[in-house]
Image (cartoon, coloured by chain):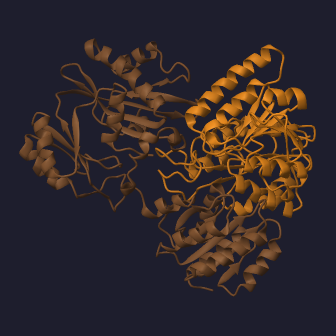
Chain colours: A orange, B brown
C-alpha cells in the first residue's frame, strides 16, 4: 500500500512538449512510472520522445486511460490546465508550476469544488490537486510523479509530507542512509493556497496500512501547521516527527515561497513548533535530525 | 510588489473609489503650486513604502501654500525612521500634497487573502487609524469580516452589513456600500494581494473617501499588468536584492557573518536555522534555484561577497537530478573566476557525490568539504570565527 500513487497510476503530462515537461516525463518513465502520454493542444496525434500526444486531457483520458495528470504548463495557463483535468475527471492532478497568480488559483479551487460535486452526482470519482509549486509525489519502487530525484528513495514504512522540495529530499536522504524506506513522500508545495494540505496527507498516512510513522516538514507563514497539530492530536495514532524551516527568518520578508512569510506576528516557527509539541509530535530543531529522530520514535513505538 | 500611496490612489480612482484630490511633487516649489490648486489648506505626506509615517514626522498639515513649502522642504530629503523601516530609515524623494478635509470619523477597511477560508476577506473596523493587527490582538470582535466570493465578489447584503458594522447611517451609509463594492472590484481586477484603507474617512458632509491607501500587487500576476511595471520604485529595495533578482536568485540580506548558498527555499531556511544552532549568525537567505549551474553559482558568490560582513560561506546543494560532479565543477570554475577571500564549506548531495568531493579537493581552492548539514554548519561557523 501507499497513498494516492502506485504502479497502476496512469500518468499524462500536460505541457509534455515543453523543455521541463519533456525532461521530467522521460525521468518519470525511466523510474518505472506508467507515463501513458502527454497533452499539448494543437499537437494531438503526434508522438514526442515515444509518448503519444493528445489535444486535450479528455482525449487522453478516453484513449490512454489516464488517471493522473502531471502539469508543467507555464504560470499564465496553469490554472486552466488544472481545471481542464478536473473537468475531465482525472483523479490525481499534480501541478509543478511555480508562480501562478493567487486569483487564478482561487478560480481553480472554486471550479474544482463544483466539478467534484458534479462528478460525485454522476457516481464518478473526485479529483485531488497536489500543489501548485511543488515537487510532486513518489511511492518508491512504484511511481514517481514529479521532479524529485528517484534514486534517493527506497520502499518502506515512513510517510513524508512537506511544504518544501529540497527539504523533502533531505529527509528522504537521511532515512534511506539509515536503511529506512518510505511509503509515499508528498510535496504539498509552497503556495498560500495548496490543493492538498498537511491534514489530507496525515489522514491518508494514518489510514494506510504500510505507513508506520510520518515526517512532516513545515515552514513559516500561515497556520497550516497549527491546524495539522490539532488534527494529529485528535486523529493520528502513529508517531509523527516534525521540522519547521525558518526559525531564524525575519518578519515581513517573503522567504522564497509565496506562502513563507511571517506577517502580523503570526506564522512564526516558534508558534508552530509549540503547537506541534503540544500535540505530542516530536519536533526537531535541526533539519539534520529528522532521520535520527524518526528512527528513534519509530523503533520505540 | 508594493506601491506608494499616491500610486495606489491613482489606481483606485480608475475604479471609481473616492480619494481626496492630491498632487505628487518632488520639490518644495512644486508644493506651493500644488497647494494653491488644492485650495491652500493641505496635508503634506511623505511617500515611502513603510507604514507609521505619521508618527515618524512624515505627515503634516499645512495651513497655506507658504506653510506647505516650508513643510515640504523639511520632509523632502529627510530620512524617515518608522517602526517598519528599521533603524536605517528610508530617504523621502516625493511628497503627496492633498486637500485637507473636514473629518467626522476615521474607520478601517482592508482586503487580503484569508488562507484558512481560501478566499479574500474584507475586514472592517470602527477603530480607524489604528494598526489592524493590534486591534485583532486586543479585541478580535471589533473586526467585521466578509468573504469575497470568487464569482460574485461581495453581494449587496455583505456591503450593507459592513456599513452597519461601521455604525454608519444616512448618506454615509449609502456611500460606504458603494465604496465597498468599488474597492472589492479594484482589489480583484488589479490582482492585489493587499488593499488597506486606513483610515477610511467619513467627512462632516457625509462623504466617504480613502484618506490613506496601502496596496500590494501579487508578483505572480504582474505579467498581465504591464501598466504597474513602471510603478516599481527600486529605491525602496535593497540594491543587492534587486541585483540578485535579475539573475534569478532569491536573496535576502541578514545581519550575521555566515553566508549561505542553497538550492530550494525550504532548504535555504533550514540552512540558516542550522547555522544558528551551530553557534553562528546567518548573513543571508539565498536560493540559487533548482539547477545550480556554474553561472548561477558565480553570480551567487559575487552577491554574497559584496556583503563585507561575510566571513565564511556555506554551499549546501541537494543535487537531486543534477549530478554531484557537475555541481562540483560549477563551484570550482565559479570560485576560480570570482576568487575567494573567505573560506568556503561545501556540502553536496546527489549522484556521484564522491566524484564531486574529489573535484573540490583536487581544485587547490580553499574549499572545505562536509558530510551532512550538521557537519557543514559546524565547519562553516568555525571558519567564520577564524578557527580552521
Examine the rendering and report whether any part of residue A296 can be seen.
no
**Quick check: B12 above or below A31?**
above
> Residue at coordinates 55% horizontally, 67% vertically from top-left?
B282
The percent position of residue A227, horizontal first and vertical second, equals 64, 37
**Quick check: B103 above or below B355?**
above
Q: Is residue B238 left or right of residue A50?
A: left
Instruction: Say which quadrant the C terminus of chain B sits in.
Output: bottom right
> Residue at coordinates 73% horizontally, 50% vertically from top-left?
A19
Q: How many marks?
A: 0
Q: B68 or B14, which is in the foreground?
A: B14
The percent position of residue A120, horizontal first and vertical second, equals 79, 18
Q: Is residue A244 left or right of residue A186?
A: left
**Quick check: A298 above or below B281?**
above
**Quick check: B335 above or below B25?**
below
The percent position of residue A71, horizontal first and vertical second, equals 74, 40
Examine the rendering and report whether any part of residue B371 can be seen.
yes
Q: Is residue A86 left or right of residue A74?
A: right
Amino acid at each position: 500500500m501507499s497513498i494516492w500513487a502506485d504502479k497502476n497510476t496512469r500518468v499524462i503530462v500536460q505541457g509534455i512538449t515543453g523543455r521541463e515537461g519533456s525532461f521530467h516525463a522521460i525521468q518519470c518513465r525511466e523510474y518505472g512510472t506508467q507515463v501513458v502520454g502527454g497533452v499539448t493542444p494543437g499537437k494531438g496525434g503526434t508522438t514526442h520522445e515515444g509518448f503519444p500526444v493528445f489535444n486535450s486531457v479528455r482525449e487522453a483520458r478516453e484513449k490512454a486511460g489516464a488517471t493522473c495528470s502531471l502539469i508543467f504548463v507555464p504560470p499564465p495557463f496553469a490554472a486552466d490546465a488544472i481545471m481542464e483535468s478536473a473537468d475531465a475527471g482525472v483523479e490525481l492532478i499534480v501541478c509543478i508550476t511555480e508562480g501562478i497568480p493567487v486569483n487564478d488559483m482561487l478560480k481553480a479551487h472554486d471550479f474544482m469544488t463544483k466539478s467534484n460535486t458534479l462528478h460525485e452526482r454522476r457516481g464518478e470519482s473526485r479529483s485531488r490537486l497536489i500543489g501548485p509549486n511543488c515537487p510532486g509525489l513518489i511511492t518508491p519502487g512504484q511511481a514517481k510523479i514529479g521532479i524529485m530525484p528517484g534514486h534517493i528513495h527506497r520502499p518502506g514504512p515512513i510517510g513524508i509530507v512537506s511544504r518544501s522540495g529540497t527539504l523533502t529530499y533531505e529527509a528522504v536522504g537521511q532515512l534511506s542512509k539509515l536503511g529506512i524506506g518510505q511509503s509515499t513522500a508528498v510535496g504539498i508545495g509552497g503556495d498560500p493556497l495548496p490543493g492538498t494540505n498537511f491534514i489530507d496527507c496525515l489522514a491518508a498516512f494514518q489510514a494506510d496500512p504500510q505507513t508506520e510513522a510520518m515526517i512532516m516538514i513545515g515552514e513559516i507563514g500561515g497556520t497550516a501547521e497549527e491546524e495539522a497539530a490539532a488534527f494529529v492530536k485528535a486523529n493520528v495514532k502513529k508517531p509523527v516527527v516534525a521540522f519547521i524551516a525558518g526559525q531564524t527568518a525575519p518578519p515581513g520578508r517573503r522567504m522564497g515561497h509565496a506562502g513563507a512569510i511571517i506577517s502580523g506576528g503570526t506564522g512564526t516557527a516558534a508558534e508552530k513548533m509549540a503547537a506541534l509539541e503540544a500535540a505530542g509530535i516530536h519536533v526537531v530543531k535541526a533539519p539534520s535530525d529528522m532521520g535520527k529522530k524518526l528512527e528513534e520514535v519509530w523503533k520505540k513505538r | 510588489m508594493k506601491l506608494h500611496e499616491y500610486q495606489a490612489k491613482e489606481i483606485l480612482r480608475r475604479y471609481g473609489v473616492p480619494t481626496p484630490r492630491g498632487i505628487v511633487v518632488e520639490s518644495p516649489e512644486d508644493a506651493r503650486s500644488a497647494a494653491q490648486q488644492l485650495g491652500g489648506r493641505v496635508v503634506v505626506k511623505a511617500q515611502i513604502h513603510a507604514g507609521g509615517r505619521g508618527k515618524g514626522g512624515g505627515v503634516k498639515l499645512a495651513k497655506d501654500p507658504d506653510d506647505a513649502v516650508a513643510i515640504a522642504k523639511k520632509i523632502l530629503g529627510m530620512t524617515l525612521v518608522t517602526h517598519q523601516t528599521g533603524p536605517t530609515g528610508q530617504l523621502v524623494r516625493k511628497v503627496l500634497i492633498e486637500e485637507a478635509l473636514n473629518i467626522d470619523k476615521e474607520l478601517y477597511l482592508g482586503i487580503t487573502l484569508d488562507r484558512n477560508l481560501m478566499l479574500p476577506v474584507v475586514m472592517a473596523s470602527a477603530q480607524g487609524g489604528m494598526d489592524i493587527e493590534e486591534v485583532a490582538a486586543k479585541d478580535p470582535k471589533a473586526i467585521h469580516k466578509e468573504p469575497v466570493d470568487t464569482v460574485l465578489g461581495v453581494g449587496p447584503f455583505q456591503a450593507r452589513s459592513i456599513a452597519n458594522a461601521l455604525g454608519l447611517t444616512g448618506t454615509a451609509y449609502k456611500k460606504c456600500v458603494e465604496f465597498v463594492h468599488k474597492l472589492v472590484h479594484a482589489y480583484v481586477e488589479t490582482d492585489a494581494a493587499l488593499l488597506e484603507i486606513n483610515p477610511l474617512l467619513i467627512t462632516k458632509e457625509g462623504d466617504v473617501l480613502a484618506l490613506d491607501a496601502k496596496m500590494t500587487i501579487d508578483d505572480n500576476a504582474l505579467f498581465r499588468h504591464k501598466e504597474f511595471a513602471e510603478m516599481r520604485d527600486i529605491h525602496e529595495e535593497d540594491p543587492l536584492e534587486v541585483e540578485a533578482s535579475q539573475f534569478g536568485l532569491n536573496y535576502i540580506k541578514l545581519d550575521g557573518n555566515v553566508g549561505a548558498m542553497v538550492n530550494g527555499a525550504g532548504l535555504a531556511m533550514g540552512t540558516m536555522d542550522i547555522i544558528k544552532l551551530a553557534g553562528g549568525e546567518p548573513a543571508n537567505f539565498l536560493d540559487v534555484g533548482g539547477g545550480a549551474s556554474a553561472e548561477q553559482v558565480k553570480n551567487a558568490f559575487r552577491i554574497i561577497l559584496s556583503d563585507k560582513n561575510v566571513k565564511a560561506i556555506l554551499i549546501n546543494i541537494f543535487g537531486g537530478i543534477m549530478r554531484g560532479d557537475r555541481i562540483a565543477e560549477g563551484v570550482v570554475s565559479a570560485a576560480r573566476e570570482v576568487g575567494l577571500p573567505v573560506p568556503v564549506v561545501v556540502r553536496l548531495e546527489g549522484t556521484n557525490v564522491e566524484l564531486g568531493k574529489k573535484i573540490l579537493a583536487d581544485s587547490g581552492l580553499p574549499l572545505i568539504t562536509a558530510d551532512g548539514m550538521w557537519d557543514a554548519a559546524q565547519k562553516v561557523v568555525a571558519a567564520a570565527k577564524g578557527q580552521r
